[in-house]
Amino acid sequence: MPSCRSSTSRTYEVEVITEQSAAKLRKGELIELELDTLRADDVLVKKAESLPNVTIIKQAMTTEVLGDGNKVIGLKYKDRRTDETHVLDVAGIFVQIGLVPNSEWLKDTLELTERGEIVIDGHGATSMPGVFAAGDVTHTPYKQIIISMGSGATAALGAFDHLIRN
């Protein structure tokens, strides 16, 4: 999987579309999921676990996406508990990126949550005067691009206000 440097390190969850689930998907039904762990609200996890057309494979590490030169045809993964390798025949995949804050270097400088997120106020100010933060690395509850964009605008305005007052 690709890697990048940013304020968050990335973990990947893969949603797998099998030939059978592709037909079901056209009917609006859910498809199989391949995840390391389920990181969602309990109500959503319970719903996914209750669906007869969803298989959840935990402790799986995707090792390869297989293709025929034109399209995805398979997914290879390793079971982290047994080290066994498995191959699923699939018609497609959806890669979902989960976020873990890359804020370890700030632990002795700024107030962080137990998950390592930077604590900010409503203006994007951190626990250190004059330092502002925004986006997925903060304790903002929803990690979405549009939320991060708004958070960035808020922090910029907060920083501007701080500079003109100090």
Image (tube, rainbow, N blue to C red):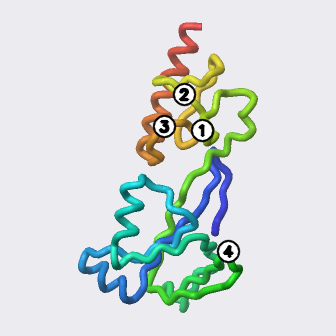
Q: Residue at x 54, y 27 (%)?
A: 120
Q: Count the marks.
A: 4
What is the three-letter code of the residue carrying label 4? Arg
What is the three-letter code of the residue carrying label 3? Thr
Disc 3 and disc 2 in contact, CB within 8 angstroms = yes
Q: Which residue is mark 4?
A: 81
Q: Residue at x 54, y 92 (%)?
A: 68
Q: Quadrant of residue 163?
A: top right
- N-terminal label among 3 and 2: 2
Q: Nearer the viewer, residue 66 or 83?
A: 83
What is the three-letter code of the residue carrying label 2? Ile
Disc 1 and disc 4 in contact, CB within 8 angstroms = no
- N-terminal label among 2 and 4: 4
Q: Which residue is mark 1?
A: 117
* Image coords of residue 10 (percent x, y): 61, 56
Q: CA distance from mark 2 to mark 1?
A: 9 Å
* Image coords of residue 32 (percent x, y): 42, 77
* Image coords of residue 29 (percent x, y): 29, 75
Q: The N terminus appears in which quarter of the rendering?
A: bottom right
Q: Could you say which disc has been placed on residue 120 in the image? A: 2
What is the three-letter code of the residue carrying label 1? Glu
Q: Residue at x 27, y 80 (%)?
A: 26
Disc 3 and disc 4 in contact, CB within 8 angstroms = no
Q: Residues within 10 Å of mark 2 (few under 14, many from 20)?
A: many
Q: CA distance from mark 3 to mark 4?
A: 33 Å
**137 horizontally vs 148: left or right:** right
Residue at the far left: name it. Answer: 27
Q: Which residue is mark 3?
A: 140
Q: Quadrant of residue 51?
A: bottom left
